[in-house]
Structures are given as C-alpha cells and as structure tokens.
C-alpha cells in the first residue's frame, strides 16, 4: 500500500495569488482537486495553466 501524497500549486500574477490546484497521488492514480481562480481573474486561462502545471 502506498501513502497518499498531496501536492498544492499556487498561481501568482504580479506577486499576488490568483489561482490554485491540488493533486492527490496514490499508487498509479492521480486526482486533481480545488482548481480555482479569483473571481476578478476568471476567464483568463489561470485555472487551465495551474492545472496543466499540476499534471506535469
């Protein structure tokens, strides 16, 4: 049995946190959770970018 591993990603713009994503790894399976961006920063590709980084 493997121990679950959580990895958290924070997207910043001009030093300010604007988005997040979390990956939960266990064995050969990964789950992506909490992909979010600030309401004022939505529809700018931040969620997609932070999620793609998390997938790497």
Image (cartoon, rainbow, N blue to C red):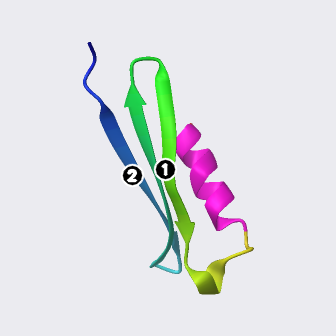
- The image shows residue 6, relative to residue 29, as above or below, that is below
Residue lying at the far top in this picture: please name it.
1
- The image shows residue 22, relative to residue 6, as above or below, that is below
- Label 2, on which residue? 8
**How far across and down, in percent of the image, does residue 33 sit?**
49, 50
- The image shows residue 56, relative to residue 15, as above or below, that is above
Q: Are marks 1 and 2 in contact (CB under 8 Å)?
A: no
Disc 1 crowd rating (10 Å Cα; few below 14, some 14-19, many 20+) is few
Which residue shows up at 55% across the image and 79% down it?
38
| Left/right of residue 46 with respect to residue 1 in the rendered view | right
Numbered label attached to residue 33: 1
Q: Is residue 42 magenta?
A: no
| Left/right of residue 42 with respect to residue 14 in the rendered view | right
Numbered label attached to residue 24: none
Which residue shows up at 49% across the image and 37% down it?
31
Cα separation, mark 1 vs mark 2, equals 9 Å
Query: From which residue to which does the magenta span run?
Result: 45-55
Which quadrant is the C terminus positioned in?
A: top right
| Element assignment for label 2 | strand
| Element assignment for label 1 | strand
């Amino acid at each position: 049995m493997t121990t679950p591993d959580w990895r958290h990603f924070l997207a910043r713009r001009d030093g300010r946190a604007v988005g997040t994503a979390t990956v939960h790894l266990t064995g050969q399976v990964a789950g992506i959770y909490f992909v979010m961006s600030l309401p004022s920063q939505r529809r700018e590709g931040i969620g997609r970018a932070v999620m793609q980084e998390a997938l790497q």
